[in-house]
Amino acid sequence: MLRRRRSKKSSVSDDLFADYTEDAAAIDAFGMQAIDSDEPVHLLAVLLHRLLSVGVVSSEELQTLGFSPDGVKALVDAFEENGSPEEVVRLLEVSAALRHYDAELAAIAGERGMSTRGEDYLALRSAIAGFSEENDLLDVRAAYERMVVECPERLPPHR
Amino acid sequence: MTPDARRTALSRIADEYVLSRRELLDSISRPAVLRVTPSPRSDLLVTVVAGVISRLPDDLASRFSDPVVGESGMVSVHVDTADAFLAMHELVDDSGRTWFAALSGAVFVDPLDVDVVPERLMDTALELAVNNLNRHDTGGYWGIARRDDGQYMLRVCASVTASDADTASWSELVAYLVTASLATTERWEDEPTPAKTYFGLLTRPDDARPFSLEDVLHAVERFRDSLPPALARVVDVRQVDDLVSLVIPFPAEGGMHHLVPAFRPHSDFIESLGVEVPGLKIYANTYADFSHEEAYEWARILNGDDKTPGLDDIWEHTTPWTLGSWLAHRSDEETAHVFYRGFVPASLARFTTLDAVVRGVVGETWSASNRARLRREFDATVEGVDVDA
């Protein structure tokens, strides 16, 4: 798959092509190694990271495929942390959870007429997340709705 | 997304607000800034010094000169033969409360032979020498004393107390520090000396109840729990084997760093006495790494040898007494850490508590990192600015 994509670029010089062939072999070898992994998220992460790191795809191209800029950054960060396969997967899952909660919390802020910039928004995020954590609620909207009823004083005032 | 990943994400979001508020994080430690009072009560200081000397055995007390009032109102006594001294200052804080500060030290004569060491290497050689001494001697700090006739190594212990506190107990502590200074000047003498003998009595293991790991862990947890809840949740307590540490977030230079003061119940070998003394070892760090040259300079500055104009009469009250000293330690070819190492003999438990030690070490580490942060941020701001333009 990798060679086919690059082979379309007929203007690539022989020298560059030679470099690329070496890279592609490394990518394939790394990919094959990763295929042995029991963890599909890790396998995909390894392949994407290798494609990014040798410039076969750019982060912009990944974004056209539906990967968010934060997701691509999380992928790069997870590998730069140089952890075990389990740790890489864990970091990616935490990043995905952060993105999920970011979207939920931004929506709640919008309902309260609050901008997502500034200290008030940070205070709202922290208050809802803290309440969720204290009560082991993994759904921040459910946590927010309970706060409105049980302890509205912990929420920053409406604007 | 696993439930664990979601919980981690929630915890990070919950911490964001606290970590974004510098002034809130700064309240983890606010060392008291004390200044030399413009009109010190020298008569009172003479009495305080006399109270310290009276707590020494006669054969040691008789070696000290009569108190001398200096130009700034500071009162000092000294031992000519050992080149040791005790200086007492009166300080005042922002609220007007007055404090006593005791400096007990000893100057070492002829540390380096100027005929052997070229003058241009003298500064470097002295810096390396005092840095190495700070690595091994945790009972005070070593610095460089500059006199008209040359440069010497200086060992200093310092302690501060509010003047309306229990000065009787504090005087006993200062007497201990004075004895330690004298014993250190005599450590290379083969024969037992009165100072070495008395210091041995003060630190003898038989009477000292060692700090237990449980005591230390509880003291560190009490410190964390004494913080406002928002701060307590971002400060972590960890225990690995017999090492108990606090992990304290420290925002600096656009990123989040961590200070990790750590405590280990352990015996220290006191060379001059030839005995193991039970106590508490202390390890801490500044938030950043430095170049080798900067690290030596920072160790010197943090040990109190700061040439910044206007700082001569300012004290930062951090530790209950000088528990240890800062030293530079190479981490690789280019960078070095600046470490704080200290030791509290178990026998000193009668003068203070583990809670005060933990609070003091956090204060020392926080204060040191804040100074380094301010300097680095200032340097980064003015970098490239031509002040003559």
Image (spheres, rainbow, N blue to C red):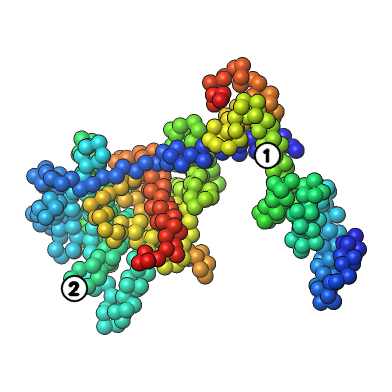
Determine whether the residue tagged by mark 2 lies in a helix, strand or loop.
loop
Q: Alpha carbon of mark 2 to alpha carbon of mark 1: how far?
A: 65 Å
Q: Residue at x 55, y 47 (%)?
A: B240
Q: Is residue A156 above or below residue B299?
A: above
User: Mark 1: which amino acid?
Assistant: Leu
Q: Is residue B85 left or right of residue B28?
A: left
Q: Chain of mark 2?
A: B
Q: Quadrant of residue B12?
A: top right
Tell how many labels. Answer: 2
Q: Residues within 10 Å of mark 2 (few under 14, many from 20)?
A: few
Spot occupied by residue B280 in the image (x, y as percentages of width and height): 41, 48
Residue that lies at the very extreme toward the bottom in this rendered image: B115
User: Mark 2: which amino acid?
Assistant: Asp
Image quadrant containing the C terminus of chain B: bottom left
Q: Residue at x 20, y 48 (%)?
A: B36
Q: Which residue is mark 2?
A: B149
Q: Residue at x 27, y 49 (%)?
A: B315
Q: Quadrant of residue A6?
A: bottom right
Q: Chain of mark 1?
A: A
Q: Residues within 10 Å of mark 1 (few under 14, many from 20)?
A: many
Q: Which residue is mark 1?
A: A98
Question: Which residue is nearer to you in this view: B385 or B132?
Answer: B385
Residue B138 visible in this rendered orientation of the protein: no
Spot occupied by residue B373 in the image (x, y as percentages of width and height): 43, 53
Q: Are marks 2 and 1 in contact (CB under 8 Å)?
A: no
Question: Which residue is nearer to you in this view: B375 or B122?
Answer: B375
Q: Are marks 2 and 1 on the same chain?
A: no
Spot occupied by residue B135 in the image (x, y as percentages of width and height): 40, 61
Q: Is residue B134 left or right of residue B39?
A: right
